[in-house]
Amino acid sequence: MSTQVLPASFYDRDVVQVARSLLGMRLVRILDGQRLAGTIIETEAYQGEDDLACHARAGKTARTAVMYGPPGRAYIYFTYGMHWLLNCVSQPEGYPAAVLVRAVAPLEGLEAIAVRRAGRARAQWCNGPGKLCQALAITGALNGIDLCDPRGELFIETGQPVPECAVKILPRVGIERVPEPWLSMPWRFVANSY
DNA sequence: AGCACGATTAACT
DNA sequence: GTTAATCGTGCTC
């Protein structure tokens, strides 16, 4: 089965569906001409100004502007003074929604990834949203990049879809100060056995 | 002031 | 072996 990049139409849907569908897809980073890649195994959906866990809750700002843009772009931001986090903008232009990529399974460019995650076990290379950005050299320099362009430095290819029986659906994490119902919305997707 | 995190440490079983 | 607590760091509003 040949691989190809996911088209913008993939992202131009309900963001929760996009988060679910991204499991099993392949995140590819071209670094110095080399492919670094991993299979997406954990995602979370954030949507709209009403979602109090979503950055767009405060409306459109310089930081969140990309989320309001066309689907298929990367929304990359910096937090806690040291971590970059990668999101995939979803739904039609004008509506702020994105999928946080929380974890990938390292697949290609393992040596380069190991260098960037020096001293840690392979299982700890990409099992967190900040970790995978460090492992794949994803920073704000790539914010707004088109994830549908296979000639770019960062894109997502088709992979092997994960069947329902291998997906755990859970509440989002890392948003403890957010009130209900947003705190408990089942918008986190985790793939088993990678 | 607070943050969609991660590394380290401490206290457990 | 595990879970809980702590805090660094600098950008956003």
Image: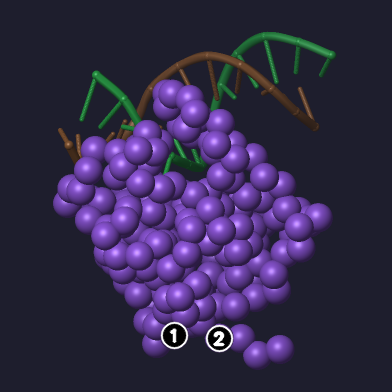
Chain colours: A purple, B green, C brown
Residue at the spot 60% in from the left edge and 64% down from the top edge: A21
Residue identifier under label 2: A4
Residue at the spot 40% in from the left edge and 83% down from the top edge: A149
Q: CA distance from mark 2 to mark 1?
A: 8 Å
Looking at the picture, does residue A30 appear above or below residue A46? below
At numbered mark 2, what does the secondary structure look like: helix, strand or loop? loop
Q: Quadrant of residue A69?
A: bottom left
Which residue is at the front of the view, A114 or A58? A58
Residue at the spot 60% in from the left edge and 78% down from the top edge: A158
At numbered mark 1, what does the secondary structure look like: helix, strand or loop? loop
Image coordinates for residue A59, horizontal then vertical, percent: 22, 43
Which residue is at the front of the view, C10 or B8? C10
Image coordinates for residue A176, horizontal then vertical, percent: 47, 26
Say which amino acid is labelled 1: Pro
Which residue is at the front of the view, B9 or A16? A16
Say which amino acid is labelled 2: Gln
Tell which subunit mark 2 falls on.
A
Quadrant, the N terminus of chain A: bottom right
Looking at the picture, does residue A59 appear above or below residue A72? above
Residue identifier under label 1: A150
Q: Is residue A59 left or right of residue A84?
A: left
